[in-house]
């Protein structure tokens, strides 16, 4: 066993964020519709997976760590499916039910192993349910090592600034996967993990690595962060801490689907930090984990065994 992976089962992560149900319709495309210039997909198979913050929780559980998930769903079939899938995945889920909304669903139509269409169904949760979730959050803080906030911009983290304040007052590190172009709501977090586009929308464009480091340092200082990780797709990822920058090149392999890779990165970081890994070590291993999931279809996970094999192969190379 790769030494740092030996104690992953001891990590306790509290995940809060926007959950959704990912539905996949798989089929064959053999003709174009006579009604419009679009392909006709004859659906042969359907699949459902937990998505959004629920996929983050799945990744944590796949690594063997303990995970509790807090979120909001509707009183509908999609919400019940999510609860069942999470239970089957060994994830403790506190899903608050809001009868006034529909559970967020992303329906993807896949033909010949390529995504042809995505249809989204979503409604923002009510204020009352969100306040109840906040109270639940406070009661569960003592039983976790790290708080992970997964913001998909669906309204489930309306009280995120208060959550960060409460968690830090309880001496719990807070990792945030951000959304949108206003990062001020994440002030006081331990780490945020914007992707390249998200970071650019907030900090502006850069032409050189030095300019990127300058912008990252400025944002990190403004928000009072311990660290900032910019995930850069085929360019790998860059970690910025006080006076230091670390770049991890993308793991070379065939990229099949990048959806959910950010979930894997922040989930792996949280588990490793909970077991005592340094930022550089956690980022290096999270980068390897991301290289595994982009080779899979849809929002996927990496198991501890898969990660172990990849790390061992890299050490022998």
Image (tube, rainbow, N blue to C red):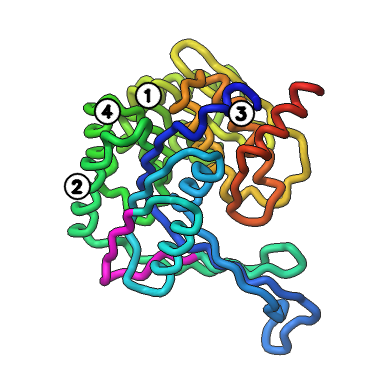
For the N terminus, the quadrant is top right
Where does label 1 land, which residue?
A: 225
Q: Quadrant of residue 317?
A: top right
| First-in-chain label (1 vs 4) | 4
Mark 3 and mark 4 lie on one chain; the one further toward the N terminus is 4
Magenta stretch: includes residue 100: yes
Circle 3 or circle 1, nearest the eye: 3
Q: Earlier in the sequence, mark 1 or mark 2?
A: 2
What is the magenta range?
A: 94-105
- The quadrant holding residue 32 is bottom right
Q: CA distance from mark 3 to mark 2?
A: 34 Å
Distance from Cα at disc 3 to Cα at disc 4: 26 Å
Residue on which the image places disc 2? 135
* Mark 3 Cα-neighbour bin, 10 Å: few <14, some 14–19, many ≥20: many
If you read the primary sequence from the N terminus, does the residue marked by circle 3 or circle 1 appear first?
Answer: 1
Q: What secondary structure is marked by label 3? A: helix
Identify the residue under disc 4: 168
């Amino acid at each position: 066993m790769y030494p740092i992976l030996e104690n992953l089962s001891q990590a306790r992560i509290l995940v809060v964020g926007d959950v959704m149900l990912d539905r996949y319709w798989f089929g064959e495309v053999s003709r174009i519709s006579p009604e419009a210039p679009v392909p006709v997909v004859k659906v042969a198979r359907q699949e459902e997976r937990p998505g959004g913050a629920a996929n983050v929780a799945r990744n944590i559980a796949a690594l063997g760590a303990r995970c509790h998930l807090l979120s909001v769903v509707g009183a509908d079939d999609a919400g019940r499916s999510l609860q069942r899938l999470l239970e089957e995945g060994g994830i403790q889920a506190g899903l608050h039910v809001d009868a006034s909304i529909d559970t967020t669903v992303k329906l993807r139509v896949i033909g010949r192993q390529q995504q042809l269409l995505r249809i989204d169904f979503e409604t923002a949760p009510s204020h009352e349910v969100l306040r109840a979730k906040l109270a639940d959050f406070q009661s569960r803080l003592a039983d976790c090592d790290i708080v992970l906030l997964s913001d998909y911009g669906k309204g489930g983290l309306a009280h995120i600034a208060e959550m960060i304040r409460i968690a830090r007052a309880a001496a719990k590190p807070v990792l945030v996967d951000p959304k949108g172009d206003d990062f001020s709501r994440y002030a006081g977090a331990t780490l945020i993990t914007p992707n390249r586009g998200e970071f650019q929308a907030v900090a502006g464009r850069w032409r050189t690595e030095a300019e990127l480091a300058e912008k990252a340092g400025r944002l990190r200082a403004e928000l009072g962060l311990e660290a900032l990780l910019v995930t850069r797709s085929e360019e790998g990822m860059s970690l910025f801490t006080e006076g230091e920058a670390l770049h991890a090149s993308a793991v070379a392999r065939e990229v099949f689907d990048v959806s959910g890779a950010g979930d894997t990165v922040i989930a792996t970081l949280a588990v490793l930090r909970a077991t005592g890994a340094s930022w550089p070590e956690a980022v290096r291993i999270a980068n390897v984990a991301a290289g595994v999931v982009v080779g899979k279809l849809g929002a996927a996970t990496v198991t501890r065994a898969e990660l172990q094999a990849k790390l061992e192969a890299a050490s022998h190379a």
